[in-house]
Amino acid sequence: MKFTHRINRVEESLTIGMAKKARELKSQGKDVISLSLGEPDFDTPQHIKDAAIQAMQEGKTKYTPVGGIPELRQAICDKLNRDYSLQYRPNEVMVSSGAKQCIMNVIQCLVQQGDEVLIPLPYWVSYSAMVEYSGGKCVYVPSKFEDGFAIDIDALEQSITPKTKILIFSSPNNPAGSMMSGEQLQQIANLVKKNPQITVISDEIYEHLVFEQAHQSISQYTEIRDQLIIINGVSKGFAMTGWRIGWMAASAAIIQKCDILQGQFTSGANSIAQWASVAALNSDLTPTYAMVATFKERRDLMLSLLSEIKGMELDSPKGAYYLFPRVSSFYGKTFRGVVISNSLEFCSYILEHALVSLVPGIAFGMDDHVRISYANSETELREAAKRIKEVLTV
């Protein structure tokens, strides 16, 4: 069987790969602590589950419109108006089976062979895979660990060419938990405005998971509204990962094209999950705030515990539920007979000897780092940090 060049360009996500290895070890009876997946360990709030049950009881179990049920599209418009004073109409909103599908829809509709896509470092693993699958070229824009992973604006400007089609980023960022300031977003908006061929994909899936400061969206700079696509969903802020509901807000033209594409591949998202999402967006955020408060406590705990490990360089993230420490000081050293040369070998060593699953930074474009998810219980986080410290102590 001969496979296409398209599928051969796609590699398995290292986040999924590390989780798979952790599950294999668990199936062998090993006590593995997984800090690799980006999934809240909280249950979906009861009122959201009740809305799903009610939808089933009312027979709302049929095919849905490709772009989403009208009630959910309206709820998204209301949310954008309520939170950011943005005026979107339902025909400028689309619902998909997760934010990931929204992003892929957009890239498939906009990126042609040879088009360039700007991706600031560090980036979520699937951005590059989606671009390369679509025939585009990834152009990576550097950031500095010492600057809280802020985008190098000068480097961004110098990376723009006539072939640049898309700029994509997440804030809060996966994997670093960093957030862009209003000043940084304004600088990006200014650059985009000067280059009308560029479309911005602003991935705001971690919008609600912020700590010391409020989330800022590039959508506040309305001068680039026609060049902007907002990506969001219910998975992270409402602990609804398995419900698989994401959405996008953009010009009616791109929504129409994405609707056509999605109609030929998956059609409308799950009906029950959509009605549950209506309840999530239309209710207060008390459960979300409680979850965020717990994540902040866990962040502070892990920063404290991991700071005890000599050579582990830490940045305090402003959102999401990840740490992205620099671990390159361990490269070239030997631990328990194992030489560590890069982030993949570092994570493999930690998994084998500490039974803790992490994600290598190379998956996010920065090999000097690893991603650690603290979406886990305090007991497991303490044990994981203890194990990591033990196997990294000479």
Image (tube, rainbow, N blue to C red):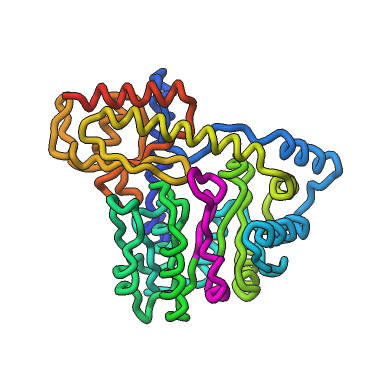
Q: Nearer the viewer, residue 140 or 158?
A: 158
Q: Dividing the picture into quarters, in which one does residue 117 lie?
A: bottom left
Residue at position x 38%, y 72% in the image: 116
**In the picture provided, is 121 more to the left or to the right than 102?**
left
The answer to whether residue 2 is visible is no
Q: Nearer the viewer, residue 123 or 136?
A: 123
Q: From the top left corner, tell me how far across and down residue 201 is, in percent.
A: 50, 64
Q: Quadrant of the N terminus?
A: bottom left
Q: Is residue 224 magenta?
A: yes
Q: From the top left corner, tell me how far across and down residue 335 is, in percent.
A: 17, 27
Residue at position x 43%, y 64% in the image: 183
Q: Nearer the viewer, residue 352 or 198?
A: 198
**In the picture provided, is 254 more to the left or to the right than 326?**
right
The answer to whether residue 105 is visible is yes
| Residue 173 against residue 41 in the figure, above or below | below
Q: Nearer the viewer, residue 347 or 123?
A: 123
**In the picture provided, is 75 more to the left or to the right than 117?**
right
Q: Dividing the picture into quarters, in which one does residue 131 lie?
A: bottom left
Q: Quadrant of the C terminus?
A: top left
Residue span colored magenta = 201-228
Q: Is residue 86 magenta?
A: no
Count of all numbered marks drawn on residues in the image: 0
Q: Dividing the picture into quarters, in which one does residue 338 lie?
A: top left
Q: From the top left corner, tell me how far across and down residue 191 is, in percent.
A: 41, 75
Q: From the top left corner, tell me how far across and down residue 173 is, in percent.
A: 43, 51
